[in-house]
C-alpha cells in the first residue's frame, strides 16, 4: 500500500511510531499576568489555540444534495468546510497562525452525495482517479491531524487508504490495530512543536482514538484485517508514552461520545461513547475533542479520578455547523511548560460567509454531483413525504420495506428458506424526505436512505419478532388515554433517535402508547392470524441493525441466510428505474397504528 509522505512514521516497521512535525515562526507573546517569578521578573507565558471539527460527513458546501438547495434547518444552522475555513482564517488572524492547530475527530468521507460520488460513481481508487473533495478542502484549509471515525470504513479499506494517501495530514487511530500483528494500522498520534518568544518550544501531542463499534458495524470490511480495542485501554497505554517523549500538552481527538453508553448492547466489552471515561480514568490529558454523538457540547469538565485535575471536553456540532476552540494558557515553571488554564467554546458557522477559495477549488466537483443527483429515474403518481412517518404508517417507509422484501425473496428463491414468509424493517431516517408527483430523480430516491447500509436476511421466530417490535415501541412517550397528543413531544422517548425506531412490514400490529414500554404491542398478526411464537420468518434487515446497532433483541444473534454488499439506497434507485412508475397502491399498506385502549390515536 502506498505510504503518505506525512504519515509514513506511523506505518513503518515500528508501527507504534507517530508523526512529528516542527512548527514555524516566533509566536506573539501571550498577555502578561500580574504575579511575578521568584527573581522579581514575570514568569514566561505562552498561549495557543487548538481548533476542532468533527462528523463533517462529506460536507464541503452549505448545500443539501437531497433537496438540491442551500442547507437550512429550524435553527438556521449552516454546514460545510467552506464556512469552517472562514472561521479558521479569522481565528488564525487573531491568534497568529503559528499559535494554532486544527484537528478533526472523524467521520469525514461518508454522508453526502458529494462524498458518495467520489467513493462509488467516480471513485478515488480508480487508476488516475480524482482527489477526494474532503482531502482537497482539508488540505487547503491546513488541517494538522484527524482521527478516524467509524464511517471512514463504510466504503472499505482501499478507499480509506487512498483517502489517507491524498491527505497532507495524518489520520490517527491508536486503537485501530492490525489484526495479525496487533500494532497500530494508522499513526496513533501527531506531535507538533510550537515556537514561543522565549526560546523554549511547546510540544503538543494529539492522540487519535476511534470507535470499537467499527468491528460490528463494518464487519464485512474489517474482519480479519483490523481490530478495535477500547479507548480507555489504549489511551492509558499512549498518554504516558507521549509525556515521556516530552509532550507538554496532550490533546485527545476521540471519535466517541461522552455519555458512557453503547448502542451495541453486550456484543463488545468496550464502551461506544467513552470520551468522558477516558478523561476520568487516564491521567495526563489536558483536553478532548469529542465526536460521533452529533451533539453540541461547548465545554464540559471531567475530573480525573487519579489526579483530581479537570479535563476539558468539547464537541462541535456535526457537518461543520460549529468549530471548537480550546484556548491554552501555559507558564514556564521548573524548567518546563505547564498548562495553567484551558477553556473551550464553539463558534457558529452560520455567522460567516463561505470561503471563496474553497468554493472555487471544488466548484467543478459540486456541479458534477448536482447534475448526477438530478438525473430522472422514474415518475410517481402522487406526492409522498416522511413528515408524519414517525407516528403514522406512511407509503415512503412501505416503499423501502417493499424493495427490501422483494430483494430478499429473489435472493432466497429456490433455496432451503424460499418457503418462509419475508418481513422487512425500516426506519424514518429523515423527516424531510419527499417524492414529488411527476418526475422522480436520484436525489428523491436517495433521500429516503441517507446511510450506506447494506441488506441482510436473518431468521427469527414469531416470539423473537414480538420482542423486537416491543423493543422498538419504547420510542413513544407514554401518553394516557384522553390526554392531548402533541406530535412534537410524542416520539424519541429516552432520546431514542428516529433511526432506532423500526417499522416491521408484513405483520399487522398496534402500539398502545397509554401502556408502559415493554407491554405496548397488541394484536400482532400475520395474514390475519395471531403470530405463532414458534413460527419462523425471514427478516430483511440493514447491516447496522443486524450487527447490533440500536441493541435490538435477537437479530444480531440470529442465523444469517443471505447478505449483500450493495447499498440499500442503490437497490431502491435501481428498483425505481426498473419499475418506471411509483404507485402507492402497489406497495403501501397500513400495517401498524398507534392506539390507546384500542382507539386509534390518528
Image (cartoon, helix red, strand yellow):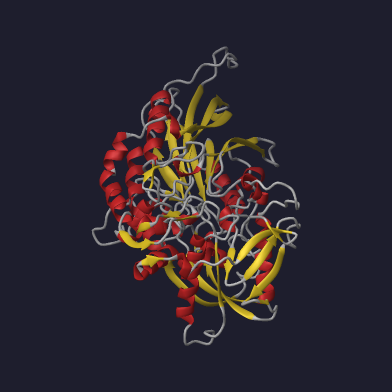
Identify which residue, 153 or 396, lies in the foreground.
396
Residue lying at the far top in this picture: please name it: 40
Question: In the picture shown, does residue 512 fall above or below 461?
Answer: above
Q: As drawn, is 254 to the left or to the right of 442?
A: right
Instruction: Out of 34 and 303, give the one closest to the viewer.
Output: 303
**Percent coordinates x, y for residue 277 in the rendering:** 65, 47
Quarter of the image with the N terminus in it: bottom left
Residue at image point 75% right, 59% down: 597
What is the x, y in percent for residue 297?
58, 38
Measured from the top left, where is residue 81 in percent x and y? 39, 40
Q: Is residue 105 above or below residue 182?
A: above
Q: Is residue 365 in sight in this rendering? A: yes
Residue 265 in view of the camera = no
Q: Which residue occupies the foreground of this view, 265 or 414?
A: 414
Q: Position of residue 123 (x, y in %)?
A: 31, 59
Residue drawn at 60 percent across, 40 percent down:
284
Residue 68 located left or right of residue 172: left
Splitting the image into 4 quarters, where does residue 382 fall? bottom left
Quadrant where the C terminus lies? bottom right
When asked about the image quadrant of residue 342, the answer is top right
- Residue at the extreme left: 128
* Quarter of the figure with residue 556: bottom right
416 or 299, which is in the foreground? 416
Amino acid at each position: 500500500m502506498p505510504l503518505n509522505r506525512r504519515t509514513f512514521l506511523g506505518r513503518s516497521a515500528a508501527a507504534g511510531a507517530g508523526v512529528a512535525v516542527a512548527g514555524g515562526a516566533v509566536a506573539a507573546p501571550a498577555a502578561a499576568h500580574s504575579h511575578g517569578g521568584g527573581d522579581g521578573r514575570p514568569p514566561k507565558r505562552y498561549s495557543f489555540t487548538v481548533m476542532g471539527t468533527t462528523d463533517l460527513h462529506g460536507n464541503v458546501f452549505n448545500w443539501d444534495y437531497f433537496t438540491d438547495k442551500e442547507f437550512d434547518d429550524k435553527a438556521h444552522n449552516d454546514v460545510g468546510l467552506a464556512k469552517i475555513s472562514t472561521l479558521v482564517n479569522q481565528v488564525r488572524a487573531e491568534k497568529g497562525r503559528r499559535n494554532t492547530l486544527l484537528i478533526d475527530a472523524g467521520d469525514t468521507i461518508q454522508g453526502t452525495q458529494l462524498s458518495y460520488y467520489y467513493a462509488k460513481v467516480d471513485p478515488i481508487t480508480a487508476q488516475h482517479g480524482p482527489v477526494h473533495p474532503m482531502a482537497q478542502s482539508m488540505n487547503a484549509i491546513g488541517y494538522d491531524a484527524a482521527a478516524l471515525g467509524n464511517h471512514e470504513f463504510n466504503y472499505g479499506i482501499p478507499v480509506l487508504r487512498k483517502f489517507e494517501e491524498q491527505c497532507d495530514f495524518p489520520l490517527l487511530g491508536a486503537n485501530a490495530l492490525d489484526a495479525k500483528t496487533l500494532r497500530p494500522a494508522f499513526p496513533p498520534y501527531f506531535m507538533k512543536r510550537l515556537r514561543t518568544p522565549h526560546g523554549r518550544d511547546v510540544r503538543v501531542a494529539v492522540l487519535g482514538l476511534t470507535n470499537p463499534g467499527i468491528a460490528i458495524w463494518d464487519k464485512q470490511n474489517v474482519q480479519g484485517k483490523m481490530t478495535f480495542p477500547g479507548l480507555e485501554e489504549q489511551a492509558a497505554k499512549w498518554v504516558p508514552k507521549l509525556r515521556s517523549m516530552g509532550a507538554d500538552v496532550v490533546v485527545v481527538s476521540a471519535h466517541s461520545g461522552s455519555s458512557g453508553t453503547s448502542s451495541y448492547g453486550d456484543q463488545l466489552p468496550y464502551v461506544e461513547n467513552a470520551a468522558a471515561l477516558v478523561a476520568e480514568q487516564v491521567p495526563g490529558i489536558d483536553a478532548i475533542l469529542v465526536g460521533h454523538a452529533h451533539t453540541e457540547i461547548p465545554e464540559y469538565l471531567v475530573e480525573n479520578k487519579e489526579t483530581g485535575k479537570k479535563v476539558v471536553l468539547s464537541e462541535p456540532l456535526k457537518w461543520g455547523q460549529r468549530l471548537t476552540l480550546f484556548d491554552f494558557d501555559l507558564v514556564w515553571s521548573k524548567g518546563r511548560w505547564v498548562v495553567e488554564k484551558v477553556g473551550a467554546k464553539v463558534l457558529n458557522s452560520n455567522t460567516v460567509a463561505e470561503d471563496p477559495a474553497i468554493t472555487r477549488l471544488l466548484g467543478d466537483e459540486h456541479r458534477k454531483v448536482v447534475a448526477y443527483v438530478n438525473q430522472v429515474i422514474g415518475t410517481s403518481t402522487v406526492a409522498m413525504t416522511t413528515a408524519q412517518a414517525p407516528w403514522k404508517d406512511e407509503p415512503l417507509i412501505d416503499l423501502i420495506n417493499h424493495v427490501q422484501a422483494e430483494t430478499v425473496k429473489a435472493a432466497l428463491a429456490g433455496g432451503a428458506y424460499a418457503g418462509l414468509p419475508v418481513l422487512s424493517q425500516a426506519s424514518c431516517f429523515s423527516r424531510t424526505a419527499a417524492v414529488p408527483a411527476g418526475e422522480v430523480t436520484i436525489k428523491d430516491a436517495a433521500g429516503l436512505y441517507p446511510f450506506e447500509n447494506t441488506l441482510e436476511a436473518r431468521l427469527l421466530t414469531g416470539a423473537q419478532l414480538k420482542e423486537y417490535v416491543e423493543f422498538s415501541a419504547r420510542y413513544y412517550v407514554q401518553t394516557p388515554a384522553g390526554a392531548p397528543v402533541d406530535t412534537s413531544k410524542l416520539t424519541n422517548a429516552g432520546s431514542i433517535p428516529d433511526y432506532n425506531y423500526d417499522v416491521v412490514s408484513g405483520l399487522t400490529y398496534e402500539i398502545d402508547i397509554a401502556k408502559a414500554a415493554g407491554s405496548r404491542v397488541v394484536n400482532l398478526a400475520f395474514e390475519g392470524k395471531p403470530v405463532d411464537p414458534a413460527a419462523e420468518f425471514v427478516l430483511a434487515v440493514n447491516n447496522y441493525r443486524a450487527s447490533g446497532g440500536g441493541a435490538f433483541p435477537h437479530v444480531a444473534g440470529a442465523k444469517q441466510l443471505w447478505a449483500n454488499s450493495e447499498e440499500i439506497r442503490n437497490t431502491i434507485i435501481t428498483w425505481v428505474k426498473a419499475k418506471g412508475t411509483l404507485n402507492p397502491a402497489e406497495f403501501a399498506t397500513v400495517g401498524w397504528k398507534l392506539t390507546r385502549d384500542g382507539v386509534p390515536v390518528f
